[in-house]
Image: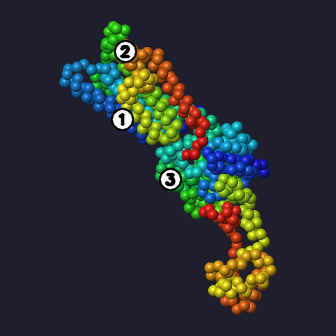
């Protein structure tokens, strides 16, 4: 099993593509810091590393796209390239091969997320100084305005985004396994990430709109503004919906990979 | 020698279509065995079932005594294979590809990788990216990958694809050596007869998923002659020649005017009589020659002729 996971990591990190992902996130952090610095000077605003980190949270959508590309390619790419045949005729159960691939996707997603957090902190710190972790950040909670440290707000921002990251890469992984095509998997999951909010809007008129994945995967509103994204939704409702989606995605991947004939 | 591969009633149906129909044969250790048939006869499907990539509708495959479905791990450990094309990770070097496969089977020392690389003759280019390999080089890398874990069964699907004549000859020698010296059961598939004739001890001829014949190639050819030979006489006067011979040669089975002369089927020992009659009738003969039945003829005969070989 360790050998299989090692193999998958070699396949991910040996590709130039992967390093472009890391470089792109670094470039965005540097660019973002430069712009922030420019406006902060003009407006005589005080910016800190932690506030910058918080605003860099949006870069996680890029992490989601990159993680979906890797997840979408990790099974589909083997079928497209025909290498899946050489992979399967080894003394390993198919589910083990699939699991090693999924764990590698998770490891890559997490690495990219941690990298983004670290780079945001580092670039922010170098540009704006590393102090300000304890500065107050105001948000409304239970009808009151409460103050939390800026550092914990930043951490919360990334923690909330880890949920769409996990679900989108799992979704891309499922599509990849089901359709055996990296192109379909990548295109479909990137599309869903980009248009998830729009889809939620469109489906708003239906009674089942609260069961839509995208309506549930941002848990931040439950904690910050005390309002649910849609009526009749609670935190536990959203968590259950997310778990059901997650289990279904994995079950479909598992069935599709272990039961079907391979004629690639 | 014990049987390395045992196929019993192997069948694959996809929808209404029977792609592989009730194949039964054994392949002993130390033999180079050919799966021969036109394109679309079911060779690749049979191979896919033998390595567990697709499920059989009915029947069993045993590899070194292990059922490929029930005892997959034990069975597949014995197998090295290339299915269809030798597809590798193009963005990795040949060596890194082999390391990938080495990590998937326990107990392969780094020295073993160098050993197989040398064996298939890729030492000089092994650290180049596979992207830059020719098809012939990828075939070699495919063979290296299949041999890494010292399998007792080697299954190669169309292994001569993309090899030049020298490469084909080299592959043939490799396979013979593996079979003779290490007792490996080698299964190769091909739609090219001439290749199989040189490479294999025995072949199974497959047509539309069915086993048409299985056995030694030389015996298959001999069986085709049923004691008669085909004789061709080159002459400008085909009709006169036919008239001179008809009814006067014992055991003559066929006699027909063909392009540029006449052709007949007859026992070998009456050929002098044919000469004699033609000379007596003043027929101008340029050549009299026995048309040996090739494996190709035999194959067309067995498969009903229609399909391209």
Q: Which mark is residue B45?
A: none
Label 1 Cα neighbours within 10 Å, binned few <14 / some 14-19 / many ≥20: few
| Of B120 and A171, the residue lying toward us | A171
Residue found 25% across the figure and 26% down from its top: A37
Tell me if A134 is positioned left or right of B292 in this view. left
Residue found 36% across the figure and 17% down from its top: A153
Residue found 74% across the figure and 47% down from its top: B8
Tell me if A207 is positioned left or right of B13 in this view. left
Residue A145, image x and y in percent?
Answer: 32, 9
Vertical comparison of B159 with B293: above or below: above
| Of B114 and B194, the residue lying toward us | B194
| Of B182 and A151, the residue lying toward us | A151
The answer to whether residue A45 is visible is yes
Q: Quadrant of residue A118?
A: top left
Quick check: do tags 2 and 3 share a chain? no
**Measured Cα–Cα span from mark 1 to mark 2:** 35 Å
Residue A160, image x and y in percent?
Answer: 41, 21
The chain carrying label 1 is A
Q: Which mark is residue A227?
A: 2
Label 2 Cα neighbours within 10 Å, binned few <14 / some 14-19 / many ≥20: some
Residue found 52% across the figure and 37% down from its top: A178
The chain carrying label 2 is A
The chain carrying label 3 is B
**Measured Cα–Cα span from mark 1 to mark 3:** 31 Å
**Measured Cα–Cα span from mark 2 to mark 3:** 60 Å
The residue to which callout 1 is attached is A24
Residue B250, image x and y in percent?
Answer: 80, 80
Q: Which mark is residue B133?
A: 3
Q: How many marks?
A: 3
């Amino acid at each position: 099993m360790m050998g299989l996971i090692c193999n998958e990591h070699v396949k991910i990190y040996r590709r130039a593509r992967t390093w472009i992902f890391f470089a792109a996130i670094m470039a965005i952090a540097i660019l973002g810091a430069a712009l922030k610095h420019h406006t902060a000077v003009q407006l005589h605003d005080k910016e800190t590393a932690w506030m910058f980190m918080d605003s860099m949270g949006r870069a996680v959508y890029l992490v989601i796209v990159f993680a979906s590309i890797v997840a979408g390619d990790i099974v589909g790419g083997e079928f497209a390239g025909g290498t899946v045949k050489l992979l399967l005729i080894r003394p390993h159960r198919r589910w083990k091969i699939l699991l090693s691939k999924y764990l590698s996707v998770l490891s890559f997603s997490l690495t990219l997320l941690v990298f983004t957090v670290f780079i945001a902190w580092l670039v922010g710190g170098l540009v704006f100084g590393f102090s300000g972790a304890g500065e107050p950040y105001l948000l409304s909670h239970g009808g009151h305005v409460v103050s939390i440290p800026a550092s914990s707000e930043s951490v919360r921002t990334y923690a909330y985004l880890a949920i769409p990251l996990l679900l989108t890469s799992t979704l891309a992984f499922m599509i990849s396994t089901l359709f055996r095509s990296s192109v379909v998997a990548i295109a479909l999951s990137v599309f869903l990430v980009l248009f998830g909010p729009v889809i939620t809007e469109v489906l708003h008129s239906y009674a089942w709109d609260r069961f839509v994945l995208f309506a549930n995967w941002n848990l931040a509103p439950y904690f910050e503004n005390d309002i649910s994204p849609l009526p009749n939704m609670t935190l536990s409702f959203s968590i259950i919906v997310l778990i059901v989606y997650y289990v279904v995605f994995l079950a479909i991947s598992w069935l599709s990979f272990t039961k079907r004939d391979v004629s690639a | 020698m014990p049987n390395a591969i045992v196929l019993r009633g192997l069948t694959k149906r996809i929808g209404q279509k029977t792609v592989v129909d009730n194949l039964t044969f054994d392949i002993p250790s130390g033999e180079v065995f050919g799966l021969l048939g036109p394109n679309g006869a079911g060779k690749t499907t049979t191979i896919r079932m033998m390595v567990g990539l697709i499920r059989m509708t009915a029947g069993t495959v045993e590899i070194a005594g292990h059922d490929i479905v029930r005892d997959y791990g034990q069975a597949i450990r014995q197998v090295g294979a290339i299915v269809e094309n030798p597809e590798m990770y193009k963005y990795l070097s040949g060596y890194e590809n082999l390391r990938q496969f080495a990590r998937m089977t326990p107990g392969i020392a780094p020295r073993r990788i160098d050993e197989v690389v040398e064996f298939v003759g890729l030492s000089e280019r092994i650290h180049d990216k596979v992207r830059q390999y020719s098809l012939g080089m990828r075939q070699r890398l495919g063979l290296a990958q299949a041999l890494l874990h010292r399998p007792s069964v080697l299954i190669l699907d169309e292994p001569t694809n993309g090899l030049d004549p020298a490469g084909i000859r080299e592959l043939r020698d490799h396979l013979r050596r593996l079979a003779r010296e290490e007792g490996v059961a080698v299964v190769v598939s091909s739609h090219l007869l001439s290749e199989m004739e040189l490479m294999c001890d025995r072949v199974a001829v497959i047509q539309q998923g069915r086993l048409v014949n299985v056995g030694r190639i030389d015996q298959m050819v001999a069986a085709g002659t049923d004691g008669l030979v085909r004789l061709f006489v080159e002459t400008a006067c085909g009709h006169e020649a036919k008239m001179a011979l008809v009814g006067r040669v014992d055991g003559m089975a066929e006699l027909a005017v063909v392009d540029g002369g006449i052709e007949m089927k007859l026992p070998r020992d009456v050929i002098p009589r044919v000469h004699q009659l033609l000379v007596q009738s003043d027929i101008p003969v340029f050549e009299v020659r026995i048309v040996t039945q090739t494996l190709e003829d035999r194959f067309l005969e067995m498969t009903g002729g229609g399909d391209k070989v």
